[in-house]
Amino acid sequence: MKKRALTLLIALLMVLPMFTACSENAADTETTAAETTATVETPSADEEIVVEEDEPEILPDIPTLDFEGRTFTFLTSGIGDTNGEDWETFDVWVEELNGDVINDAVMERNLFLNETYNVQIAEYKTSGTTLGEIQTEVKVGTNAFDAAFTHFENGATLAQSGSLHNLYDIPYINLEQPWWDQRGVKDMNLMGGVFLATGDATIVDNDATWVLMFGKQYVEDLQLESPYDLVREDRWTYDSFYGMMEQAAVDMNGDGTLKWQDDKFGFVTSDYSSRALMYASGEKLVTQDAQHNLIPIPSIERLSGVVDIAAKIMGDKNITFLTGYESTVPDDIRAVFEEGRALFYGEVMQCIIRMRESETEFGLVPWPKYDQMQDGYYNLVHTSAGRGVCIPVSQTDYEFVGAIVEAFAAKSMYTVTPAYYDVALTYKYMRDTDSAEMLDIILDSRVYDLGLIANYGSMAGSIAGVITNGTGNLASTWAKSERAFQKMMDKAVEKYADVMNRNP
């Protein structure tokens, strides 16, 4: 867990607008970007401000290098890329300082790289898709960019086709350093190779993390246990989650049917929460052995229990309301929560800013464990919204690309990440210090599954479907899709083996 480098006082003084938005396509949400200036109470004279000492900055193992003013260009997502304008990249390059905390942190990092390595950071924001751009670059060598940010599903597709360098083979890139998400490095290891990595190099993976919010007043009104305490005491499970949901759902007009405009709900969300619940159990469809060989889940016995309870949570229309019911759109669902008519609300973390003007006090918790025997919490990152950095095989100046990608990620850990994490989220949009503690847990326990990312045999989607519709019964779904799942994974393994043999 990263120690916060900013003091509470600095955070309070620096609370300024940031630009980001929820996703409609990726996360079944809809939003428009808006700027507001937060109102912050200044601590009184008798309040004690606790100042944390900065830890020494960890430096990347890169020698003194002078790239003589060369330009290093990152390919990034524009409005035409997967999931549209809501996921347009905003953390790679900016034109000038403007007082926005994210903008100015990006500028600070890029100026540091310029001064340290004599390099200019530039951005090529595609009008098409990052997948198409990388494929074209590899095929014809356009030299339009040196490295790229693209989403996890694209990373798997490109790695399998041999279009990306194994990051372990690039000098200066050290995936064991804390600016790389170690869960991502482990979970997205393809037979000993990592072709796309996430972490501090981008804050979009934070935006894409699927989180759970709860109405604090609703918890108090129902005299329920604090979700924060349940998390801290390792009692935050599917059963406790469902039990609280049951108490919250109320047919206000007595017509026998819960309707989004009139009634109260235990849980409002989109169908992507079916995946979030499944992966909150710690189960994955694809695992790895000690040699990083990909193997299918060895047993579905525990996963079957996970699916049955998750289906009860998601499929009970007397408790849970999903986007699309009664022709609702994402903003309708959010409104139910903001009006205090839903106990829980599940969405990507990017959508937290939509709550900034709400009168409803809300908190943030990780997704619940399957049971108390589970070793920890697991929080899913949306596979077509989360981003990582990759290097196309057309790039042959290994020293240049390796040094700048590593330095970019390392310096981001001390500039862009604190701006996003400590200021923009923890003190601007979160409503209490408990949520900040929960955010630490969430971001330290993100999970990635190649079975979902690469979509072998559409198995993950099939399982999510029976969770969403409330039928459960994994055995039947597994039997129907197992052959296609295994066949597709075996083909992928053959291709990855070939790529590993060809990679320098």
Image (tube, rainbow, N blue to C red):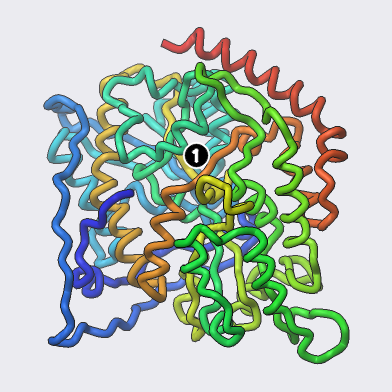
Which of these two is toward me, 122 or 194?
194
- Residue 335 vs residue 308: left or right? left
For residue 251, above or below residue 350: below
Outermost residue on the top side: it is: 501
Kind of residue at badge 1? Thr
- Residue 418 vs residue 224: left or right? left
For residue 419, above or below residue 198: below
| Circle 1 Cα neighbour tier, 10 Å, few/some/many (<14 / 14–19 / ≥20) | many
- Residue 503 vs residue 498: left or right? left
Q: Residue at x 75, y 86 (%)?
A: 262
Percent x, y of residue 4: 25, 57
Q: Which residue is mark 1?
A: 150
Outermost residue on the bottom side: it is: 253
Q: Residue at x 64, y 77 (%)?
A: 342
Question: Does any portion of residue 139 appear in the rendered image?
Answer: no
Percent x, y of residue 330: 66, 68
Q: Give the quadrant of residue 259.
A: bottom right
Percent x, y of residue 108: 20, 52
The image quadrant where one finds the C terminus is: top left
How many tags in the picture?
Answer: 1
Question: Does any portion of residue 467 appear in the rendered image?
Answer: yes
The local secondary structure at tag 1 comes to strand
Which of these two is toward me, 51 or 208?
51
Q: Give the quadrant of residue 441.
A: bottom left
Q: Residue at x 56, y 61 (%)?
A: 236
For residue 66, above or below residue 26: above
- Residue 173 vs residue 25: left or right? left
Percent x, y of residue 203: 40, 51
Q: Residue at x 44, y 45 (%)?
A: 125
For residue 256, above or below residue 408: below
